[in-house]
Amino acid sequence: RRRFPEALPPNLSVVTVGDRADSLTYVRLKRAAAAEVGIQSVSVSLPESVSQQKLERTIQMLDGDDHVHGILVQLPLPAHVDRAAALDAVSADKDVDGIHPVNFGHLTAHARSPQFAPCTPLG
């Protein structure tokens, strides 16, 4: 697991593709909830027409940034985007949704705790 300097406040990056009203509302609520508990959040908005390569590069850039502690890719994604490939671009250490194969495997095997557990199974 990655270790982050204690002085850095937690930072969540939320990646959205397109401008679906329901997704934007949900992201706004997530960011407000994060702010309430002292988590900084950044919204990275990409156009509906974004290429697979550009989306994955954006996610990988966030994943490599030590100031970003968690990444959430807002679903649904447009039909032309390979959802699995986009989600797989998020490392297990920064997978806030808990759906990375490593985190999901830890959750279902009950052998180890995932870095982040999905909220529905956790509840």
Image (spheres, grey):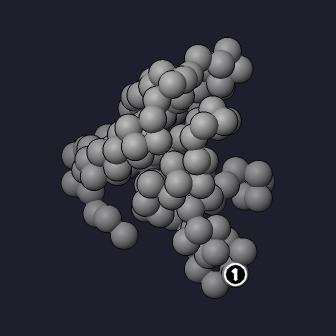
Residue 64, position as x, y percentages in the image: 28, 52
Q: Please tell me which residue is depicted at 67% across the width and 55% down the height of the picture.
A: 118
> How far from the left and from the top, in percent, is residue 37?
50, 34
Q: Quadrant of residue 59?
A: top left
Compared with 12, 83 (above or below) is below
Quadrant of the rendered image containing residue 29: top right
**Residue 72, placed above or below residue 49:** below
For the question of whether residue 81 can be seen, the reply is: yes
Q: In this view of the protein, can residue 32 be seen by the observer?
A: no
The residue that label 1 is drawn on is 109
Residue at 59% over, 54% down? 84
Q: Quadrant of residue 13?
A: top left
The N terminus: image quadrant? bottom left
In-front residue for pair 39/79: 79
Q: Nearer the viewer, residue 16 or 30?
A: 16
Vertical arrangement, residue 22 with respect to residue 111, above or below: above
Residue type at the position of mark 1: Ala
Given residues 77 and 117, the one toward you in this image is 77
Apparent side of residue 35 relative to residue 117 in the rendered image (left or right): left
Residue at disc 1, secondary structure = helix
Residue 19: x and y, percent? Answer: 59, 17
